[in-house]
Amino acid sequence: MFRVKAVFVVAVMFLFVVAAAPVLVLFARSRRGRIEGTFGVALGTFLVSGLVWLCAPLVGAERPFVAGVVALTAAVAFVPLGALASALMRPCDYGEGPVGSHFLRAEPTPESVGWADVEDEYAWILVRLVTHFDPRVPTAEGRAARARVNELLAAIAERPEYRNIARISDGQSYRLLSGELDLEHCYSYRPEPRSPDERLGLLVFLHGHGSNYLFFVHALRPLCDRMRVALVAPSFGYGNWEAPGGTEAVERAARFGVSAIDPDPGRVFLGGISQGGAGVSRAAAAHPELFAGLIFISPTMEASVIGSEAFAEGWRGRPVLVVQGERDRNVRPESVTAACELMEAAGVSVAQHRDPDGGHFLFLAKLDEVTEVIAAWARGAINGAR
């Protein structure tokens, strides 16, 4: 089932790349983005013209000469474009400052070159398209989310710690087609210590559907600074944490973070957004000993997991925060309410922040407010535990 979903996601990604290509050519924020758009235009032209030329006899028409010439021209254009792409590839690093990119496999990794800013271009277009044209996104929230993403991407482009950092988006389609969901990868962030002996906490944060975009790491930095926690943000497929291996990926990332920074065990949190919520609940049920608190943001919450005996036994009397918009049409507020009621019935200490105007982009649209809500809850959860 997950292989079929992966193939479907790759097909959607491919169509998105082709459809977004003209937009990149005209409006890309970087030179590499415009080159990527030119690739997409050439590819789309080749496919459409080639299909017209091949399929014309199927409807009783002669093969159009112009379509054949256009398809051949577009195919030939790939040669210089490919050479240009190779020349512009640049080495990636794994982070020497506060931000890191970690491939946790034992063998050397192939992620040594990349087009870092191409991921940012597609993230920018995707957010704009979804927030503009998805009728389920409240208008004001869409506008605020677009503005926030612009700020985050501008910061990533300007800050040296992000400049050449290895990403997981390069070749993601090929990995999904081959069934490789678990790259054993994570991003990290460590706040500047306030004193030589400061002991940080740890936040393991799970991305939603889509790629593990680096701009989300930057979005979480103010929260980590406020909570005084290091961040580990693992990657897993297209965010399908319910797939086989998802819980193991969360456990691996948590143990990596614990080993790297030796955090205060009373301040190790597991959080997730959207489909990342499924990963939070599953990992929390399987390994409650690893975490001191849970954070769900606009979350998918599986009743079968939340209502399980394993979850109840692991989290009875322990702190959980749920942040949800009441106008969210991607994750129905009713499903989140039902999950919260299951936790409360099991004796879990549930705190809720329900935004009456919030949709599924609540976190980005009201980043400062959500950051304050989570930081305040974390202070209370720590003090309550002590």
Image: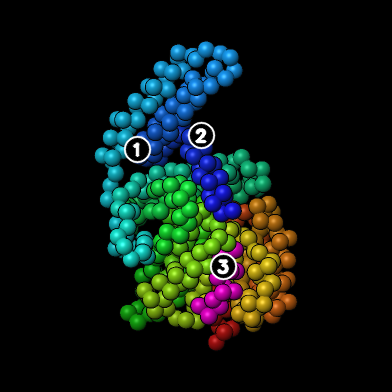
Q: Which label is found at residue 280? A: 3
**Is 210 situated above or below 186?**
above
Identify the main secondary structure in magenta: helix
Q: Amino acid at mark 2?
A: Ala
**Residue at 28% of width from left, 40% of height from top?**
86
**Is 247 situated above or below 9?**
below
Q: Which label is found at residue 89? A: none
Q: Nearer the viewer, residue 236 or 115?
A: 236
Q: Is residue 113 left or right of residue 131?
A: left
Q: Which residue is mark 1?
A: 31
- Circles 2 and 1: CB distance less than 8 Å? no
Q: Is residue 17 left or right of residue 380?
A: left
Q: Amino acid at mark 1?
A: Arg
**Residue at 48% of width from left, 56% of height from top?**
181
Q: Is residue 365 magenta?
A: no
In space, the residues marked 3 and 1 are separated at their CA atoms by 38 Å
Q: Which residue is mark 2?
A: 19
Locate the C terminus by quadrant.
bottom right
In space, the residues marked 3 and 2 are separated at their CA atoms by 34 Å
N-terminal-most mark, 3 or 1: 1
Looking at the rendering, the stretch of residues picked out in magenta corresponds to 278-290
In space, the residues marked 2 and 1 are separated at their CA atoms by 19 Å
